[in-house]
Amino acid sequence: MRRAASDVGGTFTDLVLQDSGTGHVTIAKVLSTSPDPSTGAISGFEALVAAAGVEAGSIDYLAHASTVASNLVIERSGPRTALLTTEGFRDVLHLQRQKRAVSHDLFYDKPDPLVARRDILELPERIAADGSVLVALDEQRTADLIVEIVDRGIESVAVVLLHAYVNPDHEHRVREIAGDVAPELLVSLSSDVSPKWREYERSSTTVINAYVKPRVSRYLDGMQASLGNLGVSRPLHVMQCSGGLATVEALKRHPVTLVESGPAAGALMAGIIGRASGRDRIIAFDMGGTTAKVSILQGGEPQMVEDFEVAPTTKLRPGSGLPITTPAVDLIEVGTGGGSIAHLELGVLAVGPESAGAAPGPACYGYGGDAPTVTDANLVLGYLDADYFLGGDLVLDTDAARRVIQRDICDRLGLSLEEGAYAIHAVANARMANAMRAMTIQRGFDPRDFGVVAFGGAGPAHAVSIATELGSREIVVPTNAGVISAMGLLFAPVKFEFVRTLVTRLETGSLERMNEVFAELEERGAAGLAEADAGAGTSFVRNALMRYVGQGYEVAIGMPAGRLATADVDATRTRFLETYERLYGYAEPHGDLEIVDYRVTASAPPVPFELPRIGRDEASGDAAVGSRECYFGDIGFVESTVWDRYRLRGGMSVGGPAIVQERESTTVVPPGAVAVVDEWQNLVVSVGTTP
Amino acid sequence: MTVDPLTLAVVSGGVVAIAEEMGWALRRTSFSEAVREGEDCSASVFDADGEMIGAGNYAPGHLGTSPTAVAGVLEAYPRTEMRPGDAFLVNDPTMNSGHFPDIFSVAPVFYGDEIVGFTVVTAHHVDVGGAAPGSQAIIGIVDIHQEGIRILPVKYFSEGRPIRQVLDLIAANVRIPDQVVGDLRGQFNANMVGAAKICELIDRFGPETYRAATAEALRRSNEAMREHIATVPSGRYEFIDHIDDFGPDTEPIRMQLAITVGDGRIVADYTGSSSVTRSGVNSYLAFTTAYTLHAVLSVVAPRLPLNSGTMRPVEVTAPAHCFFNARYPSPTGGRAIVARYLVDGVQGALAQAVPDQVAASSSQLANSTIGGVDLEAERPWVYYDLTFGSTGARPNKDGCDGLVSGFNTGNIPIEIHEAKWPVRIDRFGFIPDSAGPGTYRGGLAVRRDVRNLADLARLTNLHDRHVYPPWGLFGGGGGSLGRIVLNPDRADETDLHSKSIVDIGPDDVISFRTCGSGGYGDPFRRDPDAVLGDVAEGWVTVEGARRDYGVVIEGDRVNEAATAALRGMR
């Protein structure tokens, strides 16, 4: 069995291939391509199979993750998109919920929607809260508006009609009419994408779906076709923000679940590594070329959220982004990566969020980049080896890095070259430390109780300093740290969530309906898994989202498999009251209860995890391969030992100052820190007990 | 004892996170749309001395008055009588955010046998009885006892169990008891979540370190606040504004504010303002103080947290029985409209000192209530409307369209309102040409049309700025006036008074129209391309562009010559 995965980031595309017979892993890392990232992913795949010495056609399983959807939203670079909504409600998308993300900041602004007001058009129709039709859909007007939308050159439309979560008939009819009048127009219905009440949140989710749909569809089709041309016969599995894999067809219908999906794979893998090495509480820190991502795992499981926000206007404040109502791994992303550009803002040094990306890239890449980046700074500081970046595949131009830092930062701030470079490194660290604080302290966790698993191409060069600032005592740098998210894709489950909203009293009279709904959802789950070629050994987890009659939010209560009987009604009631009391300290024993959402999670059996071994010849010889001068702030330049990660063996220890190099990443062990290689080949850096 | 910087950060950030989480728990467990959707609520954490050490991102009027509620409960119930799992209610305007509907739940936090602090969870209850559904009527109210049930500090949960007699007494005196009692339980749930989380925090550091860290955080907040105040030029800054009236054919209510800055302190004095009114609109001093403080913080120290340390350097005074220092038994149900004047007034005064740190006047909220009786079910119903407009223009950018100012609450989704009450929302959107013009324009006014479906219902209006528009700054124009229109575009279309009480029948439509907000700077200096963009999006009409900005738009472009000529004529 050969399994391969590719993870497209803003700067690099990471690829891994594992032969489950031998356990050997082959790795490739190539620059991401823009505007079409599938070009880089495909050429990377060719490089990967060549390096592994296997035929593309012999790959049994293929998984993929991509930032393509997130980037479209964050950069507002998607195509012009339209919204069709109920007459009288054109402005719901712009009004939003009107609350402030920060109470006393007069300069706060809400996020701009993805659709301009002029492209929001109103349909004469109206459905009441009980699903009855008050005003029939004006079909002629619908057809006219769809023609109008197409005439404006728009290829994707969101349809959000009031109360469509109860009665989707009008939305369905709009799709039929669009199919007749403009079969090429991509249509996203709110009753499909996010069948939940609250019109703004449903609109936001559906609009994001419509906004990313054209590009994501072309992208995924292109990937599938190109892989086919290379001889790959297996379907592509694509990561979703929930941490589950889905088929290309499913993703093309609901591309909104692709948003923030790549980081989810990294978080999953950090959890696997943490659990395998006996660590229960983990901060996953993933720093790539464009952004850094922080998430939290307990017992190997990532923290999940029922909804999340993308592209916040105000740093790290909930409420300032565009809401997406779909289950997701909880994470925070900040615009600090290896390619983030250092510049002066009102005379103060700032790093990111603008990124040089892969093109033009950092100045030291020699691809025309002319702005100083974090990678340039790390090179000047001696942390990176100009001749061993990506194992020597990319020779870095140290002079170019020096020149741009001197010109843009040092000359203007009156700093020496090293001071300027170190300031860039430190400012980037401070931003990432803030993200870690937001993920821990602001959520009531103490970072000192957590180990940090650091990965991504740039993560290991920064993690020790950041973790020290937060008081974390232990930083785990796994092998192949530069491609951990891709590795996570190999072990992620194929997983689908099916939800149906049907408000039902919890009483024996409802049993028949409850059984019907769960059976229907499990049928859909089985079909989804069959489509994904993951039929055998599937499992279904049932949840009922419940509340007291009259409330607006629900608590998830696990439900037994099979046909529910009278005794299950009382048992469910007891479970609800116990859960509610545990969560909120008191549960009124006599209140009426109702089920609002029925949810079935259908998953294929998990891929058995084997800690991957390095798929090259076992390097031998002295692991200390040299030394060079590295700059550490107040201490200045210090002679630091350079270690070859592939020659380190379990039990060996490396005292700082030291640099540990592997092909895809470089770990910086500052003075005073000690790194020990554990039995799983992780580099475990300890930074003492005082922050 | 000294506290290391990281522990200080974890504890001071931790209590804020706990307050946020308490508010989240309240919304998750509450029954009313006002709380769970509108977030007309708050949560905060106090130390054992009754000092506020952490507040969530919630309603400033509730947060700023929470210290008073803790003090009130402590005066009525000695600490020695308190047990874990106890909680106390209070809604008297001398101790809460200024009217009966805001019921505060105060609970001690025990760590072992010792009280280590208090949590306060507040909720606006949509009805607390009294003369009108919604308990916010202005006309015909002469004393506070017409405004519903008055709760002086009373224990309602004892050692984790509800005290049935208290809840039953409240339930019997309000129109929608399921929602009110459901939300009171939710408030207790949030208190308990807070207590559990605080104990977890103390488990990690020990009570002594926790106490030292919270005290140090307050000390530093206080110091930072004083430093921020010191950056404002010392002096006395005055501002005068007017609330339209307190009913048809009544006088305007004068607000006279003098802010004195100096010695690291700010004193806001409302001497010279009108006296209390014989109506449901008056402002008790705790409420006046809370919003004045909120506005001072917004202008002077937007990045500092709200806690007792940042509150201390700000003093608010007003003579007794002045409109801004009403005393028992002055009624106060409709005091929500006063917050707008307090927030804007501080900005108007401080505009003279720090013009780059203030915004022009923002939209007033429309906070009307519709109530009636469901004859079949033999019980009353109450629909609570919250229509917010936009924020005033800033020195470097436009006001924010469709964002609340002052109150930090949200709108209530149409789908949720319609699922619960006999109403239908016909329309919810912006009103073009309503923003105060300026180099930077204000935000637009918002219109929400509500159709009554019940046989007979009573509309109790609570709105303002139908007479005095929101003002602009430094040459910026004022926003459009607010209106409430009964049956718009019909033969019987009628403009209603902002505080009127009107009986309505089936299919009567009430169109709430907030005012627009004020502009900043001369509108004839606004970038013509920005005006063009506003016209393309429908925020400004072609006629509005010409009239208010001197910009001539033809098709999808600016006629530059005609614009220059028009602008030159002024």
Image (tube, rainbow, N blue to C red):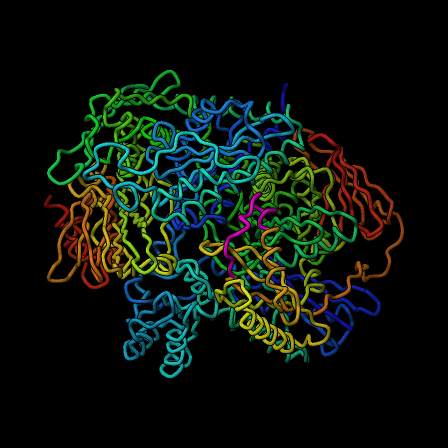
Residue B95 in the figure: left or right of residue A285: left
Residue A651 in the figure: left or right of residue A484: right
Q: Position of residue A635 (x, y in %)?
A: 69, 29
Q: Is residue A75 above or below residue B271?
A: below
Q: Position of residue B545 (x, y in %)?
A: 18, 53
Q: Residue at x 31, y 48 (%)?
A: B386
Q: Residue at x 36, y 49 (%)?
A: B176
Q: Quadrant of the C terminus of chain A?
A: top right
Mark yes or no: residue B547 visible.
Answer: yes
Q: Residue at x 21, y 27 (%)?
A: B276
Furthest residue to the right? A621
Q: Position of residue B60 (x, y in %)?
A: 39, 36
Q: Is residue A486 above or below residue B196?
A: below
Furthest residue to the bottom? A180
Per the rendered image, the range of residues in magenta is A580-594
Residue closest to the eye, B173 or B260: B173
Mark yes or no: residue A310 visible.
Answer: no
Residue B511 in the figure: left or right of residue A465: left
Task: Count up the numbered dots.
Answer: 0
Q: Is residue A477 magenta?
A: no
Q: Position of residue A329 (x, y in %)?
A: 60, 55
Determine which quarter of the picture holds residue B254.
Answer: top left
Q: Residue at x 67, y 27 (%)?
A: B206
Q: Is residue B509 above or below residue B86?
A: below
